[in-house]
Image: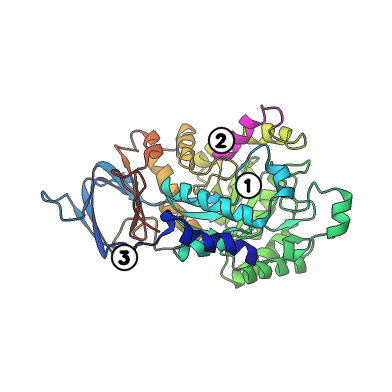
Amino acid sequence: MRALLLPLALLAPCSALAQSTPPPASTELHCGQLFDARSGRLAGPHTVSVRDGRIAALAAGIPATSSRGAVDLRGHTCMPGWTDLHVHLEDQSSPQSYSEGFRLDPVDYALRSVGYAEKTLLAGFTSVRDLGGEVAPHLRDAVNQGRVRGPRIFAAGKSIATTGGHADPTNGYNSTLSHLLGPPGPTEGVINSIDDARQAVRQRYKEGSDVIKITATGGVLSYAKSGDAPQFTVDEVKAVVDTARDYGYRVAAHAHGTEGMKRAVLAGVTSIEHGTYMDDEVVRLMKQRGTWYVPTIYAGRFVADKARIDGYFPDVVRPKAARIGAQIQDTFARAYKAGVKIGFGTDMGVGPHGDNAREFIYMVEAGMPAAVALQAATIRAAEVLGVDDQGVIEAGKRADIVAVPGDPLADIAQVMKVDFVMKDGTVYRRPDDNGAAGAP
């Protein structure tokens, strides 16, 4: 794993973008509208004062005379920085993705992740939950140290799977490779018992993860036939959840199939990711137990579209992508109408990083009001993460603020026009410089 640190550490002195410039002690934002994430309403013109990375004060209205250094956002709506609860920053889908796994080194993926992280931040996402990838904990540290530009990262590290499951890293290997490498175990994130489950969580703790991710069912893009079969017993998931709780972790469960979702919810996971074949019983259980749903509509639509292209996916993957991907938006619509708690997530890395905000548009297309969609990426996302210092623009909270021109509640497509991004009081994008300002 030390090899992953090398490109991230070396990048800082080599890149002009990575040079750290401390934010000013205080900044004033003049917002034409302020989105109140608690109420889901626009609160009118506001002045937001930022000091030492935190929101110091809010005042209704905008002064007639601007103070020196104030940021003019009078034609914009200011919102809390968005959170994407499901990304994979180390990679991005392409027809070469499967062969690259045999040709590229970990440092290659680490270097790629730097650009993906910056694109995500400049798109308005000041926080992400990276649900599976050994690069993410190291990228998180590099961002926190000011070496590269990126969102705040809550990293799962290696996803936990069963043998042959969606996150078994040896799926698709030939018999010679499998024999040479031997079967993966809990250290590699593959379990087959309750004891294995405990060990796998403890290994993630040892490696510095922030959250635990399991693959409770088959998946679309793994080199395996089933995209929805259950892949853990209830007792195995419960062992993951109970051990995770000992370390203060929450557990996210990738799940497409009904039975796998049911087992994960009964075992106490925090969130269900994707949820394609969610039925009425699973909806009832999720509402009863307060389980969150992170839909990832973008990923579903992306893989369904790419499944129409000859050669984009391997033959074993293509039918899964066509069948499962096309259903997620309809599942989301039913879950929202039924009252399931929803957080914002895209599974970006499947689609192109930086396009995350398109998920808002798909959510609104499926029947969710724009204000509720924005809440899913702000105050609700903070609840999923279990943090209380972000997701709202209030005094004392982190100064994570994004702005778009016009009124996104009237036209959700405005989310694709982010031209102001502040994270922890540092401005990374502003209307007059198109992202060139700020640091690190």
Rendered image: mark on residue 282: 1
First to last magenta residue range: 297-311
Judge depth for marks 3 and 1 and give the one in front.
3
For the residue pair 52 and 45, the one nearer the viewer reads as: 52
Judging by the rendered image, the residue that carries numbered circle 2 is 329
Please state which amino acid type lies under the numbered disc 3: Gly
Instruction: Answer whether residue 299 is magenta in the image.
Output: yes
Q: Is residue 98 above or below residue 49?
A: above
Mark pair 3, 1: CA separation: 38 Å
> Tag 1 or tag 2, which sits nearer the N-term?
1
Judge depth for marks 2 and 1 and give the one in front.
2
Judging by the rendered image, the residue that carries numbered circle 3 is 396
Name the residue rendered at 57%, 56% in the picture.
289
Mark pair 2, 1: CA separation: 17 Å
In this picture, residue 390 sits left or right of residue 161: left
What color scheme is it? rainbow
Question: Badge 3: few (under 14), some or many (20 or more) residues near its Cα, within 10 Å?
Answer: some
Question: Badge 1: few (under 14), some or many (20 or more) residues near its Cα, within 10 Å?
Answer: many
Please state which amino acid type lies under the numbered disc 2: Gln
Q: Quadrant of the N terminus?
A: bottom right
Q: Position of residue 362 (x, y in %)?
A: 49, 35
Q: Position of residue 288 (x, y in %)?
A: 56, 53
Instruction: Answer whether residue 429 is magenta in the image.
Output: no
> Tag 1 or tag 3, which sits nearer the N-term?
1
Q: Position of residue 129 (x, y in %)?
A: 53, 55
Give the main secondary structure, helix, strand or loop, of the magenta stretch.
helix
Q: Is residue 115 above or below residue 310?
A: below
Mark pair 2, 3: CA separation: 37 Å
Rendered image: mark on residue 346: none
For the residue pair 222 and 4, the one nearer the viewer reads as: 4
